[in-house]
Amino acid sequence: MPVIAFTTALLVLKQVLLVVLQGGTRVRTGQFAKEEDARAFRGKAGGDAPIVELAQHVIRNGLENEPIFLILLLVVHGAMPDTDLGPYAWTFVAARYLHALFFLRRSQPMRTIAYTVGFAAMVGLAVQLALYALPQLGG
């Protein structure tokens, strides 16, 4: 369970860092998408800085992928408690951090490679779970 807890903490921290990047950039540049934010922080409304928009894409992508992986970790831990989740978790976390970095830097094909490595870790864990469960379905 410590692997799951640490993995969760690292993925949440990544999202928090992205939100801090967004907020800090908005305040520093004075560019805001929302009129009320521009008024509150004495800036200009009309659109976010490009890095803020990129960070928003990274946040959304994380919310589309990371909860699924965390749920998968919990299910595998419950079904197969002796499974070493570390290699899957560390690969996924490293890939997600690299994906975020490459996304923010607009670095292709590195962004796609990082995404694919994380996706492969998730698929590998899902396949391992399916192979465990399949024989038990026959009754």
Image (spheres, rainbow, N blue to C red):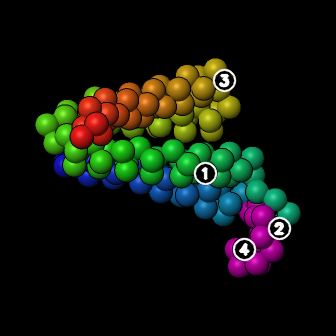
Q: Residue 114 vs residue 4: left or right?
A: right
Q: Are marks 2 and 4 in contact (CB under 8 Å)?
A: yes
Instruction: Residue 60: give its label.
Output: 1
The answer to which of marks 2 and 3 sits earlier in the sequence is 2
Which tag is nearer the camera, tag 2 or tag 3? 3
Amino acid, disc 3: Gln
Give yes or no for contact between labels 2 and 1 (Cβ–Cβ under 8 Å): no
Please give the residue where the numbered disc 4 appears in the rendered image: 37
Mark sitting on residue 36: none
**57 above or below 125?**
below
Mark in front: 4 vs 1: 1
Q: Earlier in the sequence, mark 2 or mark 4?
A: 4
Q: Which image quadrant for residue 27?
A: bottom right
* Mark 1 crowdedness (10 Å alpha carbons): few <14, some 14-19, many ≥20: few
Question: Which of the marked residues, 2 or 1, is nearer the chain's N terminus?
Answer: 2
Q: Which residue is mark 3?
A: 108
**Left/right of residue 64 with respect to residue 126 in the rendered view:** right
Residue 95 picture location, percent across and down: 45, 31
Image position of 97 (left or right of 33):
left
Q: Say what secondary structure mark 2 lies in.
A: strand
